[in-house]
Amino acid sequence: MNERQLSCTIKPPVTLTIDSKSTNSGCKIIDVIFPTEIGEVRFKNYYVAFITLKAKVKMTQQNTQEKSTDLSWRVAINNFRLMPDAHTETGAQDSFSFTKKQFQCDMNNVISLRIILHQPSPQWKEFKVEDLKLFRPSSGTQLSSLPACLLENVTDKSEKKEMHGVPDLNALSSGLQQLWALGEEAAASQTQQSMGRYDVDGCYDINLLSYT
């Protein structure tokens, strides 16, 4: 995947207040300005519980024909949960990535991206996103060449090369199972009684050995 990081302007976070008071609402907004198409958004979380991405789309002839009262702003990611529990540290400093597969709208002709951060827990004094990076859509993923053994399922059976001198795997497996069964049978029929020694005065009797 050819990654091309976007050149953009990231504005400082703006903390929303309630009724123009100094009361912290637990919500911040970050605006990113750039004239391009977004393919991926990466960042490292810092105690943000939920995140929403809204894209401001440049008005074109195509979208002006659409009958909508809010064509300029579109929701790309809606209230995505970053922390399983806002009051615990799980996921508080993990890295995340949103790609086109997760975007809920078309990210073409985007001129501004609004990132809405939400932390309902009063336990954390600060919450933000770090190392924010945006990338263009990939020009196309080039598949690396695979070994022939991995391509057997997609090739025509008539085109497979025959391997000479190698036994059939099914026949080999069946033979090994038979050998294993014979070995188990022989082990089960072995006597537990000691055979003793065949030596007499330190020498072996050839007649006794011939019957074994």
Image: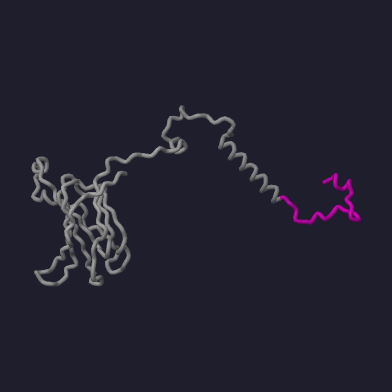
Q: Where is the N terminus found, in terms of image quarters? A: top left
Q: Position of residue 108 (x, y in %)?
A: 18, 44
Left or right relative to 168: residue 23? left
Q: Is the residue 137 above or below the residue 165 in the image?
A: below
The spot of residue 58 in percent (x, y) is: 12, 46
Percent across and percent down for residue 170 are: 56, 37
- Asked if residue 73 is positioned above or below residue 177 in the image, the reply reads below
Number of numbered discs on residues: 0
Residue beneath the point at 9% across and 45% down? 67
In terms of depth relative to the viewer, which is nearer, 153 or 187? Answer: 153
As displayed, is residue 125 above or below residue 108?
below
Q: Residue at x 23, y 63 (%)?
A: 128
Q: Residue furthest top?
A: 158
Q: Is residue 100 left or right of residue 111?
A: right
The foreground one among 143 and 176 is 143
Determine which quarter of the picture holds residue 49. Answer: bottom left
Query: Of all residues shown, which one is farthest toward the right?
Result: 201
Front one among 140 and 199? 140
* Residue 47 visible here: yes
Q: Position of residue 22 (x, y in %)?
A: 13, 72
Residue 190 lies within the magenta run = yes
| Residue for point 12% across, 69% down | 18
Coloring scheme of the render? one colour
Stretch in magenta: 189-212
Residue 106 seen in render: no
- Give yes or no for residue 159 being in the magenta stretch: no
